[in-house]
Structure formats: C-alpha cells, structure tokens
Amino acid sequence: MKEYKIVVDSREQLPLWKTNTVVKKLDVGDYSIEGYEDKISVERKSLADLYGTLGSGHKRFKAELQRAESYEYFGIVVDGSFTSAYKKDFPGSYHSKMKGFVITAIIFTLHVKYKIPIFFAQDRTESKQIIKHIFNAYMKQQK
C-alpha cells in the first residue's frame, strides 16, 4: 500500500492528526486523502455536534450529504458511544432540545436512505483509529 497524506478540513477545530497532513477546505467531510478529496471523505462529530447538526443544522448537513452522494466512500464517525447518544448523556447535552431517540432514528434513516456507514467510537483516539482503518482499506483498493 502506498503512503498517503491525510487532508484535514481547514474548519476542523481540533484535528485528530498533527503530522503527515495537508490542511485545506474540503467540500465534504472533515478528513480525506490527498489526491482523492473528491472520492473519499469522513465526517467526524462529537456527540454535542451530532445533536446540533441533526437538529438546527439539519438543512446544511443534508446539502453536504447530497454532495457526498457522488463520492466512492463517505462515512460518519461519532466521538461517543451509541448509548451516550441515545440516552443524551454527554457534556453540554442540556443545550439541545432534541431527544436521544429522535437523534438515533435520524442516524439510522441516514444510514438506510443514503447508505452512509456510521461508526460510534469511545473517544477521539478510537475515532482516529477508525478513520485510519477506513483510509487504509480504501487505499488498498486503489492498486
């Protein structure tokens, strides 16, 4: 497998990677692979961001999902467990009026309707590992 650089969206506030990266604006997602920015992308969300995006930011996010339809791969990685999302058990959760069962229903609708894989990670470290495995698997297919 050839080496690659990870592209980090310039709007990503706390990037998972600090080395072997290129920072630039991505049209879709937060992370991609240099040279494949229009083919593969992964969106990373904290639980608080997930609630905000699927609540008040739903229209903007839907437009991003529609742009992602032409990609070979688009996935979402959530920094937090499914149980924490469902039970609305995370720091700052009281800021959202959304209910946990509504958020999880929307997540599975996105998965079924748009065929978007959604991964729940324990924390940022696990999110980083998941994204790296996705990118490695994608690059293996590019031979």
Image (spheres, grey):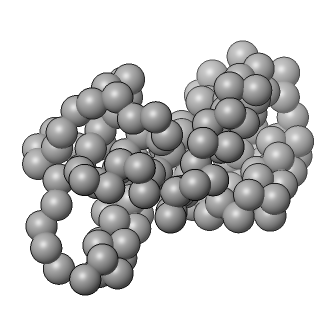
Percent from the top left, x then y, of residue 50? 64, 36
Which of 93 and 32 lies nearest the eye of the viewer?
A: 32
Percent from the top left, x then y, of residue 9? 35, 33
- Quadrant where the N terminus is found in the figure: bottom left
Tell me: residue 50, above or below residue 2. Answer: above
Tell me: residue 126, above or below residue 37. Answer: below
Residue 2 visible in this rendered orientation of the protein: yes
Query: How many numbered discs?
Result: 0
Which of 43 and 91 lies nearest the eye of the viewer?
A: 43
- Quadrant where the C terminus is found in the figure: bottom left
Residue 125 visible in this rendered orientation of the protein: no
Residue at left 22%, top 33%? 23
Position of residue 11 in the picture relative to residue 44 (left or right): left
Residue at left 63%, top 22%? 92
Q: Residue furthest top?
A: 95
Percent from the top left, x then y, of residue 26? 39, 35
Residue at left 34%, top 81%? 141
